[in-house]
Amino acid sequence: MAARRKKKKKTTTRKKTTRRKTTRDVLCVGSKVKAYVKSQGMKCSGELVGGVSEQIHAMLDSAINRCTENRRSTVRPHDL
């Protein structure tokens, strides 16, 4: 029987990349946003859905902060 050779692990060095901005999930349905804008007789840019999603994130972050300040763990509509 032939002796098996041990495989050497390849070591690669990667450059560390710094991210300027962490990506967040999109919290709105892009097609619905675009359909609404179109129904109002307007056109929308490709960045609109991302901007709407960022505004939603900001609103939710604000509501969560208000909720924790009031010592609650349930976010309610009036927190918005």
Image (cartoon, rainbow, N blue to C red):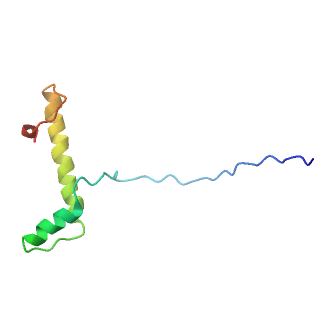
Q: Is residue 14 left or right of residue 53?
A: right
Vertical arrangement, residue 37 with respect to residue 64, above or below: below
Picture quadrant where residue 61 is located: top left
Q: Which residue is found at the position 14% from the left and 74% from the top?
A: 43
Q: Which residue is found at the position 22% from the left and 53% from the top?
A: 54
Q: Which residue is found at the position 57% from the left and 54% from the top?
A: 14
Q: Count all numbered tags in the image, as a single digit.
A: 0
The C terminus: image quadrant:
top left
Residue 42 x %, y %: 10, 73
Q: Residue furthest top?
A: 71
Q: Is residue 34 left or right of residue 5?
A: left
Residue 45 x %, y %: 20, 71
Q: Residue furthest front?
A: 1
Residue 56 x %, y %: 18, 50
Q: Residue furthest right?
A: 1
Residue 78 x %, y %: 6, 38
Q: Which residue is found at the position 17% from the left and 35% from the top?
A: 65
Vertical arrangement, residue 34 with respect to residue 74, above or below: below
